[in-house]
Amino acid sequence: MKTSKTKIILIITVAVFALLLIADVLLLNFLRSESNTVGNLRRTFLEEYSQNYSSLNTERKLAEATVKEIFISRMFLPENEIVEFISYLEALGINNGVVVVTKAVDVSGLDDAASRVSGKIIYGDLSVVLEISGDWAGVIKFIKLVENSPYYSQINSLKLSRNAEDPADPWKAIFSLKIAVKSI
């Protein structure tokens, strides 16, 4: 009797073990297939993310380049606005309580006829010599405003003077200004 009971327990134990082994194999296969699915989803997500990020990055860089191009193009005074710019400088002086007299104007580098015919933009320089007179604060403020012009400019020389014997005399400044110009 003991042997038949032992045989039954052995058969049940083997059957349970076989069922657990089959369940384990099935579970591992299921997890492996889910792992592959998750891996494929992750790979797809990463590919789409990198493509979208790359296109966003490209769009951002294109926008930055456009802004830089606009900024650079605005740094050059158009040649058809030279007279208005000089009038603006003189009006700027009046608005700041100083008298501005334009002593000399010279435009160089814009005389390339072949480039004008082909439609290329030509770059040159506008050289202006200005004489300013007024109180110290007005003269200095005018010079700062000219230095902070939106155009690419350079003050080549600056001479400040005042009659030391008569403090009522105004300050005088003579300076040479060079501004980048472009043809239209």
Image (cartoon, helix red, strand yellow):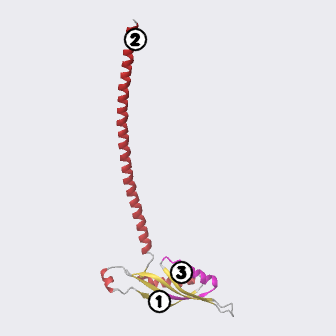
Q: Give amino acid for label 2.
A: Thr
- The answer, for residue 95, to whether it is visible in the render is no
Q: Residue at x 40, y 67 (%)?
A: 66
- Closer to the camera in the image, 144 or 99: 144
Q: CA distance from mark 1 to mark 2?
A: 119 Å
Q: Residue at x 36, y 50 (%)?
A: 47
Q: Are marks 2 and 3 in contact (CB under 8 Å)?
A: no
Left or right, residue 117 beside residue 165: left
Q: CA distance from mark 2 to mark 3?
A: 108 Å
Q: Give amino acid for label 1.
A: Val
Q: Earlier in the sequence, mark 2 or mark 3?
A: 2
Q: Earlier in the sequence, mark 3 or mark 1?
A: 1
Left or right, residue 150 beside residue 66: right
Q: Which mark is residue 146?
A: 3
Left or right, residue 52 beside residue 149: left
Q: CA distance from mark 3 to mark 1?
A: 16 Å
Q: Are marks 1 and 2 in contact (CB under 8 Å)?
A: no
Disc 2 is placed on an element classified as: helix
- The answer, for residue 53, to whether it is visible in the render is yes
Tell me the magenta residue range. 128-150
| Percent position of residue 113, x then y | 33, 86
Q: Residues within 10 Å of mark 2 (few under 14, many from 20)?
A: few
